[in-house]
Amino acid sequence: MTGITTHILDLTAGSPAAGVAVTLEQATVTGWAVLSRATTDADGRVRDAFASVPAAGRYRLTFATGAWFAARGIESFHPEVSVVFEVRDARQHHHVPLLLSPFGYSTYRGS
């Protein structure tokens, strides 16, 4: 498996965060270029929308967390979460999970 996948776990509810808008961008010499947009599925995952990573380089996943919490009537601190990471070998799979709460988050390189 290659490409980039992600999932979001809502730590306050202990369940997947379904319906979060996610954007994948690649760094260029002039800024960030949008590669793809997706929404997390019922399991809080984006599986196939970012399946093709064109090359090694710097990438950014931006999660629309503020809108997601607001739609649920929950106050939150971060209007969005951006995770910037380096792809050194585009033939490898890169999984970038987001552990989310209204006032904080954590991420890591998953498998």
Image (tube, grey):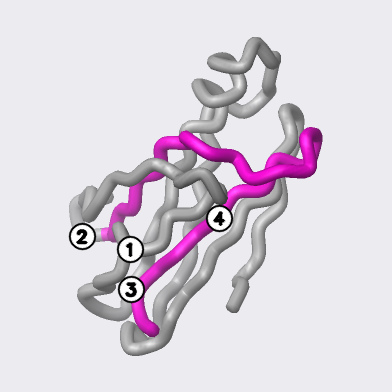
Which is nearer the N-term, disc 1 or disc 2? 2
- Among all residues in the image, which is located at the extreme front? 42
Return the residue at label 2. 29
Viewer-proximal residue among 106 and 2? 2
Q: Secondary structure at mark 4?
A: strand
Return the residue at label 3. 57
Residue 38 falls within the magenta-colored stretch: no
Location of residue 20 with respect to 35 vertically, above or below: above
Viewer-proximal residue among 60 and 11? 11
C-beta proximity under 8 Å, tags 4 and 1: no
Q: Amino acid at mark 3?
A: Gly
Location of residue 94 with respect to 61 vertically, above or below: below
**Residue range highlighted in magenta:** 1-27
Location of residue 111 with respect to 70 vertically, above or below: below
Q: Amino acid at mark 2?
A: Val
Return the residue at label 4. 7
Return the residue at label 1. 48
For the residues labelled 4 and 3, the Cα–Cα distance comes to 21 Å
